[in-house]
Image (cartoon, rainbow, N blue to C red):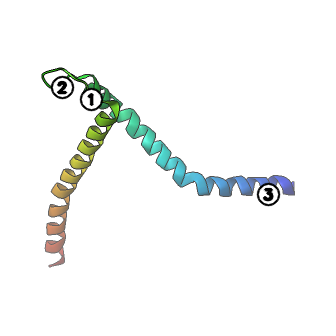
Amino acid sequence: MVLTALAIVVVARLLWQVGEIVVLVLIAAILATGLSPLVELLRRRRWGRKGRQISRGASIGIVYLGVLVAIGVLGSLLISPIVDETQEFIE
């Protein structure tokens, strides 16, 4: 009985410590799955006069750069009005 309780406590503590890592891995898996069609679209497309394809790594880099730019633009569009409204509310 005591051994079972101790095992439950140990497993719970281990899951608590590993929980952050599991969340990060799940977020990465969701991002990879969601962005995979865009990566494949870029990889298959022919570029330039000679019709060369770009590598999968370059496609991944371009897609992630695009996502970061989109997040930055969206953030800058949202933060400015929020700051203005907050300043007006304070006054």
Q: What residue type is labelled 1?
A: Ile
Q: Give the side of residue 60 with respect to residue 78, left or right.
A: right
Relative to the observer, which residue lies in front, 75 or 57?
Answer: 57
Looking at the image, is 74 positioned above or below residue 64? below
Q: What residue do we see at 27% from left, 26% from top?
A: 41
Residue 71 position (above or below residue 48): below
Real-space Cα distance between discs 1 and 2? 8 Å
**Quarter in which the C terminus is drawn:** bottom left
Gap between marks 1 and 3 measured at Cα = 54 Å
In percent of width and height, residue 90 lies at 18, 77
Type of amino acid at the residue the image marks with label 3: Leu
> Where 87 sits versus 14, above or below?
below
Give the residue at the far right of this rendering. Answer: 1
Q: Nearer the viewer, mark 1 or mark 3?
A: 1
SS category of the residue bearing label 1:
loop
Q: Residue at x 16, y 55 (%)?
A: 77
Tag 1 and tag 2, C-beta contact below 8 Å: yes
Q: Which of marks 1 and 3 is nearer the N terminus?
A: 3
Mark linked to residue 6: 3
Looking at the image, which is closer to me, 61 or 15?
61
Which residue does the numbered mark 2 point to in the structure image? 47
Q: Which residue is drawn at 30% across and 40% down?
A: 61
Q: Where is residue 26 in the image (x, y as percent from the top left)?
A: 48, 43
- 23 relative position to 1: left or right: left
Q: Name the residue under label 1.
A: 54
Q: Indicate the quadrant containing the N terminus: top left, top right, bottom left or bottom right.
A: bottom right
Counting from the top left corner in percent of width and height, residue 17 is at 60, 57
Q: Residue 11 carries which label?
A: none
| Amino acid type shown at disc 2 | Trp
